[in-house]
Amino acid sequence: MLDIAIIGAGPAGLATALRLHQKGFRPKIYEGVTALKPLGVGIDVKPYGTKEVTELGLLDEFQTISVEARESIFYTRYGQEIYAERCGKHMGYKHEQRFVHRGTFQMMLFDAVIERLGPESVVLGASCKGFSQDNDGVTICFESRREGAPTEVRADVMIGVDGIKSAVRKQLLPESTRSHYSGITLWRGVTLMKPFKSGGTILHIGDPKSQGSLIVYPIRDNEDGQGNTLVNWVVEQNGRPETIEDWNQKVTPDEIAHKFDECKLDFLDVGHMIRSAREVYLFPLIDHDPLPQWTFDRVTLLGDAAHAMYPRGGNGVCQALVDTRVIAEKLATVSDPVEAMRQYEAERRSIVNRIVVANRGEGPEVVRRIVEERSGGKPFDDIEKILPLAEADAIFKEYHRLAGMKRPDEKPGETSGFRSVFLAER
């Protein structure tokens, strides 16, 4: 049996271990932190991501810790509705779309790894410093950050799942460390508040290019035992100076507290939600060029280490979950592990790289910019005169198709005619 080393115990690394275990392997995960904590804010798990979680045998647990998405609604800066579509099973997909706290999702996967593979399967306090490989395997060197953590291990293959600042990627592709600040900064926060709309609604508010963008969705029901929901929100703004690329920079909401006060929704006080945040994190959007190669003989990359992308459209974690299935299938069915890893890359890299580039643009959020431009940034009387439903529908169908989850209401052979919207963003 192959001895498989996984570098990184984030959601993708943990899911990789679970997928490999399903195929009869007993991989070991090496993680630099000395204790896993449920850090982060919300993530949007699309139907194809829920499919992967279901195949891991964790649907019940996932449903317990998350909120089912029912509808997605787009608004102008003034709170006028632009477009709405149903989500997940409510759209006709086989699987649900669900919202969840990233840290809670990670700990669900961690608990499953410990239960199925045993506590010895996750080695904390082992930070990957580098590696070397030969015809028979990989030698991995670690900085030991806790007593008992190794300084060196030997494995047949190694999978680098160590995130946007991947040490594995840096050694394989030193030029990949070059990046460019997009000029866009995200504030990501969570607020405890009363449920709004259907209780499973994601809101998209404002114009991303001028006023800024706000995304809002619930991630945990009845968080306080009194019926209040923990809501995740993300504000996107242009023009702020670059900060370090770190998901865990804690800040206050003061800088953006009044950015959306002109938005008038009868079911949500947006400004109050932002000012009442339990915690807020700052993150700069950094452009990482799509990688020309993931696999180098017995070492390969997976998840953010392979395809860091803007957090738009909810595809980052979902694409990583697909990676885990494919690499497990290849290692289980191809006798030569080097060839198995090559086939994994061949199946996944070009598909994901297209999404990476498309997400540098606005993704489906483009409809808000279109309305802003056509309306001159003013309130309108009739959205059909600004952005007809058929045009908006075509844009959304194309983005669903790009992400590999063709919308159930799409007719056989139908093409949107709006692919140029996404091509222009690349």
Image (spheres, grey):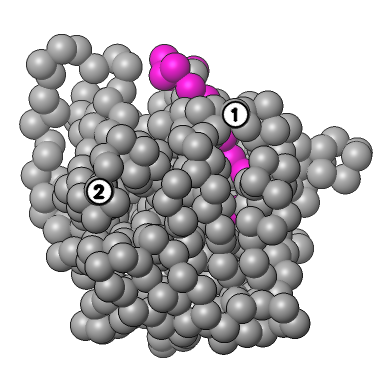
Specify the segment rendered in magenta: 90-102
What residue is shown at x 11% (from left), y 54% (from top)?
Answer: 424
Q: Determine whether the residue tagged by mark 2 lies in a helix, strand or loop.
A: loop
Q: Give the residue number, with chain letter if any, for mark 1.
A: 57
Q: Is residue 72 magenta?
A: no
Image side of residue 217 versus residue 295, left or right = right
Query: Where in the figure is residue 286, as x and y percent of width and height?
Result: 34, 74
What residue is shown at x 57% (from left), y 83% (from top)?
Answer: 151
Q: Determine whether the residue tagged by mark 1 lies in a helix, strand or loop.
A: loop
Query: Where in the figure is residue 87, as x and y percent of width and height?
Result: 47, 27
Quick one: 167 or 388, which is closer to the camera? 167
**Residue 335: quarter of image:** top left
* Marks 2 and 1, how far apart at CA: 28 Å
Query: Disc count in the image?
Result: 2
Given contact means CB atoms under 8 Å apart, are the residues at marks 2 and 1 in contact?
no
Between circles 2 and 1, the one closer to the viewer is 2
Q: From the viewer's perspective, is residue 154 above or below residue 347?
A: below
Query: Where in the figure is residue 310, as x and y percent of width and height?
Result: 36, 60
Quick one: 290 or 423, which is closer to the camera? 290
Amino acid under label 1?
Answer: Gly
Amino acid under label 2?
Answer: Asp
From where the camera sits, is residue 391 visible?
yes
Q: Does the magenta stretch include residue 93?
A: yes
Q: Quadrant of the C terminus?
A: bottom left
**Residue 353: quarter of image:** bottom left
What residue is shown at x 45% (from left), y 56% (from top)?
Answer: 4
Label 2 CA crowd tier, 10 Å (few <14, some 14–19, many 20+): few
As drawn, the label of residue 396 is: none
Residue sticking out furthest to the right: 226
As drawn, the label of residue 336 is: 2
